[in-house]
Image: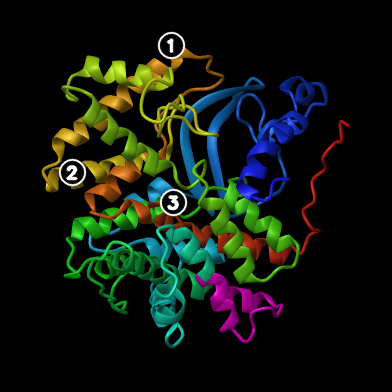
Amino acid sequence: MIRDVETYAALKQPMCIQNDTIPDALFQEYGVNRGLRDINGVGVLTGLTRISNIVAFRTEDGKRIPCEGELWYRGYNVKDLILAQEPDRFGFERTAYLLLFGQLPTESELVEFTEILAGCRTLPTNFTRDVIMKAPSRDIMNSMTRSVLTLGNYDDKAGQGGLDNSIRQCIRLIAEFPMLAAYGYHAYNHYENDESMYIHRPDPTLSTAENLLQMLRPDRSYTKLEAKALDIALILHMEHGGGNNSTFTTRVVTSSGSDTYSTVAAALCSLKGPKHGGANIKVVEMTRDLKTTLEDWTDEKQVASYLTRLLNKEAFDRAGLIYGMGHAIYSISDPRERLLRTFVQWLAEEKGRDKELHLYQTIEMLAPKIIAGNRPIYKGVSPNVDFYSGFLYELLNIPLELYTPLFAIARIVGWSAHRIEELVGAGKIIRPAYKSIV
């Protein structure tokens, strides 16, 4: 009789594979789309929203024609929102207001909202010591999830209903997320890596992007371009429709009547998956492997050969993927990548990293052609936002452990907006159907 659970699990694995495998042919027979997406990557329609819109195709003569990607927040093109910003101002707070409340703030409304956020950048007494530092983890997403659930214990109205209560909780979490991520990393870095410990308090006069940088760095210093580039990255990651995995999770859990803290914790668990929020880490690790593998990574032919080996599962993690290429919705272009790469270029030039920037540009040029030549393509392949965001964080000297938490710091705004919309709609619990094929 086996008494060791690890051995027992290993022996039972083949049984699970045998009894739980459902062939593609059955999905086709019953008209069920794997992953709620058809062969062209179009998602099954499961809801309506006013929060954002993603454009990847246009209809002409009854046919879907791929087009340049667009992302709209509450009726505003994200490109216009970013390009309209004054050079010396930051847009995270203004865009967060737009997503949460459905309209751009006036100057006085923006000042008020910014001050509200600044006032919420506090944690309960001894929370950092007792919750974050006493259980350090390399997985900062797990640390943040635990912290979010624990914050619910400090909220006397954690489980109470009322739209105003949920709005209050969402605003507080938006303000607290940068601290949960930064302090979670510092605790891990100190206790696990034996590095120096420093905890910088947020500065109420600084933007979210500026506060993030000053909380992460020992000397609290940063350049204006660094803060601006991070601000743009946060805006571009803030929201991406109700169908992405973590936002759909938010709406599903909200529809059950669960509280804000449990809902956000569930969204965090969804985002941390490598198929969702962890993709930019893979891009950085892939390029690092490329540079150590090739004799001359400035040689275009060698780069092309490496990318081909990636697709053939002969290089890096042997998953058969060129990370940062392709998207579930976009085909011709990801508008977020188009906007972000401009700031990445400026930052790379400021830091003297032109050679590495050229490598990314070479991969961006070669990869779609190599992918199209090696496997069937049902829609176009182009770089997605993860392709450059990881390089941006690397340029900002942000450790890999914080790449996905940075995504969460931005996306908590979108989650909050969708939670509010789901609560206002007060619809039925989300309960899709599964067909038994026993």
Instruction: Give the class, few, some or many, for how many residues have Cα within 10 Å of label 1's Cα (few <14, many ≥20).
Output: few
Find numbered disc 1 in the image and state the secondary structure of the residue it sits on: helix
In the depicted structure, whether residue 248 falls above or below residue 32:
below
Per the image, the residue denoted by label 1 is 373
Left or right, residue 115 beside residue 9: left
Q: Quadrant of residue 397?
A: bottom left
Q: Nearer the viewer, residue 89 or 303?
A: 303
Q: Which residues are magenta?
A: 147-169
Q: Which comes before the other along the chain, label 2 or label 3?
A: 3
Q: Position of residue 187 (x, y in %)?
A: 35, 69
What's the residue at 69%, 31% (across, down)?
14
**Picture quarter with the N terminus:** top right
Q: CA distance from mark 2 to mark 1?
A: 31 Å
Q: Which residue is outermost to the top?
A: 373
Q: Which comes before the other along the chain, label 2 or label 1?
A: 2
Name the amino acid, label 1.
Gly
In the depicted structure, whether residue 353 falls above or below residue 185:
above
Q: CA distance from mark 2 to mark 3?
A: 21 Å
Residue 237's disc is 3
Q: Nearer the viewer, residue 225 or 274?
A: 274
Q: Is residue 283 visible?
A: yes
What's the residue at 44%, 75% (across, down)?
113
The answer to whether marks 2 and 1 mark residues whose Cβ atoms lie closer than 8 Å is no
In the depicted structure, whether residue 79 falls above or below residue 257:
above
Left or right, residue 102 beside residue 16: left
Q: CA distance from mark 1 to mark 3?
A: 31 Å
